[in-house]
Amino acid sequence: MRLRHFWILWFLLTTTAAFAQQVEVEEFKFPASKNFVKIPFKLVHNLVVIPVNINNSKPLNFVVDTGVETSLLTQLGKFDSITLNNVRPLSLRGLGKGEGIKAMNSSGNRIHFSGIEAKGQQMLVLMENIFSLSTRLGVEIHGIIGYSLFKNFVVEIDYQNRVLTLFKPGTYPKKRLKKASRVPIFIEDAKPYVKAVITSEDGIKHPIRLVIDSGLSTTMLLYLPSIAALKIPQPNIEAYLGRGLNGEIHGRIGRVESLQLGSFLLKRPPASFPDSISIQHALNLKNRNGNLGADILQRFKVVMDYQNGQMFLTQNYKYGSPFYFNLSGLEIVTPIPGLNYYTVSDVLPNSASSKAGLIKGDALLTIDGVNCATKSLEEILSLFQSKPGRKLKLQVKRDSATIKTTLYLSDVI
């Protein structure tokens, strides 16, 4: 983000915002004579990424996140610029420790993609790039879009073929639901909720209510204080779980025996248990027990029908795959998004990578003799998540030295 340009734009708009006329909010409109629109997407870290234009901008990469009400602009690239309308400052709160962050609220914007457009749209602009999505996902990520995309369409997310399709209400072909299982959902405060059941290691079944969160790349977050008699499973590990609007989220990760979602029973999925300080804001809401993430959703073709309070799930080729948790013990980032250069940002204690002597700051050079510069981040992560027991020979750069080591993938939970 070019901060100088951004700040100048902010001052200009706040100076004139008081005199600007309110722009009527419009819903997204389809191209004439069309009942559906297909949008190919990138699947990165289990997250759906689509191109979106804001006003007169070039296509920007936005994560599709069912857990977000208002579209967020999180970051601009070095050579990107964007014009926003009717801007005023505000503070945002969410998950994480801390007091929230400074942001801007912008109204009266035109959002358009794949022939679909809506005017008078609201956007929130983060004053700092707290999520670092681009370095973590390996491609430039500019924002997050959610409720405005789902509220007036039937939305099909085909994770297997990487196509998101929007249908006008009442036009979704019933034959596409022939093998699907219907799951009731509940829309509250612009967020979709689903009822599920987890079975803990002691065999007790716990009914839970989860936010369907396609912007959460892992399986699920469970808010331990909100679920009676549930304990963190053994074994478990302490881990950094991510970043919320209020700051870093820490907690523990362990496996539950099963997750019942509609007619589907998913066995031994990992669950993240944030510490109570990180989720205090969510606990105060008292209407949820956690979040259902994309590592569950991506095992299905998902059809979301907000208007009729229903979700349809059709299992795909990933449905029966085991749930592995970070078999390498590495967290990998790309310091320059779009460039195939990868460094270690974190190493889990007692993991395969710590036993191999890898440390934070190491730059990956080769894996089994293959130059990492020829691989995308997704390909690198797939190698590190392939299967427990696999042996990978690595070369890394540490300061001015080249270090060789062998990594034996293992599941720490």
Image (cartoon, helix red, strand yellow):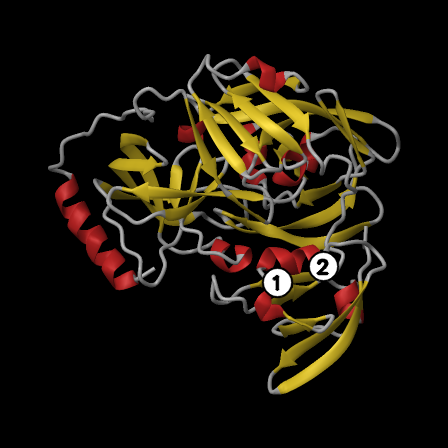
Identified by mark 1, the residue type is Ile
Circle 1 sits on which residue? 332
Q: Where does the image place residue 409, in percent across and percent down from the top left?
A: 80, 60
- Which residue ends up furthest to the right in the rendered image? 202
Residue 257 vs 151, above or below: the answer is below
Horizontally, residue 13 falls left or right of residue 380, namely left
Q: Where does the image place residue 248, in percent across and percent down from the top left?
A: 56, 53
Horizontally, residue 28 falls left or right of residue 331, namely left
> 324 or 251: which is nearer to us?
324
Whether the residues at callouts 1 and 2 have beta carbons within 8 Å, the answer is yes
| Image mark for residue 384 | 2
Identified by mark 2, the residue type is Phe
Count of numbered labels shown in the rendering: 2
Asked if one can make out residue 287 in the rendered structure from this viewpoint, the answer is no
Asked if one can make out residue 160 in the rendered structure from this viewpoint, the answer is yes
Q: Quadrant of residue 388?
A: bottom right
Report the quarter where the N terminus lies: bottom left
Q: Where does the image place residue 245, in percent across and percent down from the top left?
A: 48, 46
**Residue depicted at 32% across the width and 43% down the height:** 53
